[in-house]
Amino acid sequence: MSQIEHEFTKNIKRILSEEFGDKAEQIFSSCPILQYLNVKTKSAERGSKARGSFGNIYAIYVLVEDYVKKGFHKSGNYKEYEGAKFNNLLKRQRELPFGEKLQNHALNHRLNQEFKRYFPTCPYQPILRDVQKRRYWFNEKLLICDIGGKKYNIANTILKIIDEYIEVKQNAFIKFIETCEQLKNLNRTKKEDIIKFILDLLSPNVDARLFEIVSYSILKYYYHDQIVYFGFDLDSIEKVNLQLYKTGRCNANDGGIDFVMKPLGRFFQVTETVDVRKYFLDIDKIERYPITFVIKSKDSVLELEKKIREKAEEQYTITAIVEKYMECIEEIINIPVLIKRFINAVDNGYLNPILDEIIKQSKVEFNYYDCDDEEN
């Protein structure tokens, strides 16, 4: 693949220069794993709103860390190693910043698949594993660069690059939280600044987790004042406010339910794709119960419905099957609809509660706690 340049590329090259001097540029250009990391770290300098890549990067990190901790970068007898235990690798991934809810996908197949997509002519895959024994290795062929007949081991360098990427992303998120807190403390004449800040978070290129958090915060207060009448008989009917609950962590493997509404029992799933297979998998997971999709797209609701139907017809040639799945889509909420509902909630006096909810959910999602949080 052609070499890309972005802001964090300078960090990578600086680290390589510190490690390898005048050989740095050659090592950077000739090592596929460094080129891959360069691609995966392009969001580093784009702030907290840019999607961060942690799953595949952390799969590399924990295996290379295991390789270095056991001294194989010096001893050279890695081929005799029994392999790292899967449970230990997954546990270590989840100890890293932003890694608490990572699943096993990157270690088992996702990293290898994506690496192959970027480097189809490279004969090596990053992760080697013994499925039966649940033992894992990082392909040492990708850690040793041959420059003019001299071999350079880049294992330590990879750890330094990823450590710096983590630090940059953490700093960006801390800055995001600080900005939220500052806006929260502005007087009422600065209301426009808060509105603009939140509207900027409703963008197709915003981090998926932030989009889910902002969507939830807006919809929670949009529905907040809506009332339904519930009861088991005519004598016990009560007025009940609609309440939206967030059911778990963002992008978690929770069966396709991101929000649930009481007392109507409506299900909401936040997504950034129009991949029909994913939509219908979510529907199947909940036994074809109606579900509302919140889609990170500026396409109109009609356009999104059309795309979903067309792709469904490509996949399922039977009209009855297509219709059964389409009937399960209770509502589509896109970015323009979210903006309208945000403005409605603001008009009803919920701007500051929405911002408070964004701060609260962001801190939970990114495991961020400041001194005040610990005291409360």
Image: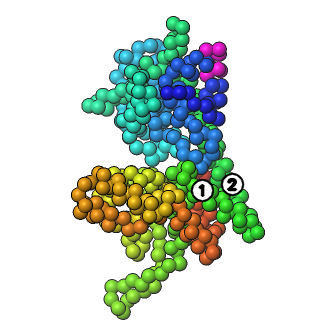
Quadrant location, the C terminus = bottom right
| Mark 2 vs 1, N-terminal side | 2
> What secondary structure prevails in the magenta region?
helix
Amino acid residing under circle 2 = Thr
Q: Nearer the viewer, residue 223 or 337?
A: 337
- The reply to whether residue 167 is in sight is yes
Q: Is residue 88 left or right of residue 367?
A: left
SS assignment at label 2: helix
SS at circle 1 = loop
Residue 201 is labelled as 1
Name the disc covering residue 143, or none.
none
How far apart marks 2 and 1 lie (CA) works out to 13 Å
Q: Residue at x 64, y 35 (%)?
A: 7
**In front: 143, or 280?**
280
- Residue 24 on image: x %, y %: 61, 18
Q: Is residue 5 left or right of residue 315?
A: right
Where residue 263 sits: x, y (%)?
A: 40, 75
**Residue 199 pos. (x, y %):** 62, 60
Please name the residue shown 54% across and 11% down the image: 147
- The correct choice, above or below, for 68 with respect to 110 in the image is above
The magenta stretch spans which residues? 16-23
Residue 284 is inside the magenta segment = no
Task: Check the image and report above or below for 301 versus 204.
Answer: below
Q: Amino acid at mark 1?
A: Leu
The residue singled out by tag 2 in the image is 179
User: Any magenta on residue 20?
Assistant: yes
Q: Residue at x 33, y 63 (%)?
A: 326
Q: Relative to 102, does residue 254 appear above or below in the rendering? A: below
